Amino acid sequence: MRFPYPTGSSAVPLFLAPMAGVSESPFRRLCRVWGADVVVTEFLSAEGIRRENEATISKLRFGPEEHPIGVQIFGADPVAMREAASAVTEVFQPDYIDINFGCPVKKVVRRNGGSGCLKDLDLVQEIIRAVVQGTHLPVTCKIRSGWSEEMRDPVAIGLRCQDAGVKAIALHPRTRTQMYTGHAHWEEIAALKAALEIPVIGNGDIKTAADALRMREQTGCDGVMIARGSFGQPWIFRQARALLDGQPMPATPSTAERFAIALDHARMVQAYEADPIGAAIEFRKHLGWYVKGLPNSADLRKQLHAVNSFDEVEGIFARYLESDWAHEAAHDATHDSAESASEESHAA
């Protein structure tokens, strides 16, 4: 079954997950360059959209190169959700509207938003039907497996969502009470896929490109959504695409290449944000992710987490590349590559 939004020729599209404070326009564009088929905005309050809150509206900005893109909204008031969907459709014209029924954060769920809605499946259906009424675009949703272990039933939730009119469902198979602990129960993605007529997108515990392939093979999901696995490694999409298409996986970028990608990302953020100092400070988290796993990364992160300008980042990277640590990183990368080739040979 075809997805309700364009995904090119990809048989199994790869999605960048909606993530607050991360899935901003520069990162979405970077992930598109590196092979993400579909991107989604960070989740946005329906009340904020309806009231034209400046901070909320600013996060709705996206460029033509970001298509296909979904705008994700959240809220527990069906009227507000319908009006928000209508406004987003008319003013911003994304490819689809996604409803967040998955966010586990306390400040969202205490107002019954996000995964808080899963305590009341009648409300879930009311919200979906209201959003469908407010837009001519396809409506999708992202869910968890339930509010708690006692209420864990992703198939029942999915059937209710399908009946209310969504065109696809992304499942993160953890409950709200699990937050991000434990492991994602991929067998629940398989069960949901078997039960529904609409496409099912798998999400959860995709840390490497190989994980994306395993999820597809184990669950039969129609698409794979990558969240935290994209942090500091947007190339995961290109690698996953190759594996899903039965091609050799491209090599992981070298340290110098990794730094160049991080600097490209930084320049995109600098051009996008109005406050250069605030943008540099906010970007520190990305810098920490880009250097994760490198020799002496703790000291490197300490330096990067103190920057107040993007110029400082370039200097820190340059000094690292001239250090003995960079040579150690290159040696480790060569060793890892040889081990990987050996494993592939034995597997074949």
Image: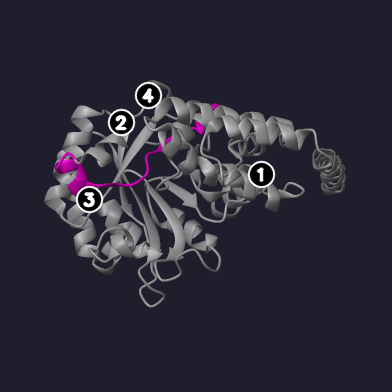
In the picture of the structure, the residue carrying the numbered disc 3 is 128
Could you tell me which quadrant the C terminus lies in?
A: top right
In the picture of the structure, the residue carrying the numbered disc 1 is 291
Q: Which of the marked residues, 1 or 3, is nearer the chain's N terminus? A: 3
Q: Amino acid at mark 4?
A: Gly
Secondary structure type for disc 2: loop
Residue 181: percent from the left, percent from the top?
Answer: 52, 67
Number of other residues with Cα within 10 Å of mark 1, as a class: few under 14, some 14 to 19, many 20 or more: many
Which of the two marks, 2 or 4, is nearer to us in this view? Answer: 4
Q: How many numbered marks have been drawn onto this rendered protein structure?
A: 4
Q: Is residue 75 left or right of residue 190?
A: left
Number of other residues with Cα within 10 Å of mark 4, as a class: few under 14, some 14 to 19, many 20 or more: few
Is the Cβ of the residue at disc 1 closer than 8 Å to that at disc 2?
Answer: no
In the picture of the structure, the residue carrying the numbered disc 2 is 94
Q: Which residues fall within the magenta stretch? A: 31-52
Alpha carbon separation for disc pair 4 and 1? 28 Å
Q: Is residue 47 left or right of residue 233?
A: left
Which of the two marks, 4 or 1, is nearer to us in this view? Answer: 1
Q: Nearer the viewer, residue 176 or 9?
A: 176
Q: Amino acid at mark 3?
A: Ile
Secondary structure type for disc 4: loop
Q: Which of the marked residues, 3 or 4, is nearer the chain's N terminus? A: 4
Alpha carbon separation for disc pair 1 and 3? 41 Å
Residue 38 magenta-highlighted? yes
Q: Which of the marked residues, 1 or 2, is nearer the chain's N terminus? A: 2
In the picture of the structure, the residue carrying the numbered disc 4 is 63
Q: Amino acid at mark 2?
A: Pro
Alpha carbon separation for disc pair 1 and 2? 33 Å
Q: Which of the marked residues, 3 or 2, is nearer the chain's N terminus? A: 2
Q: Is residue 222 left or right of residue 260?
A: left
Is the Cβ of the residue at disc 2 closer than 8 Å to that at disc 4?
Answer: no
Q: Is residue 94 left or right of residue 298?
A: left
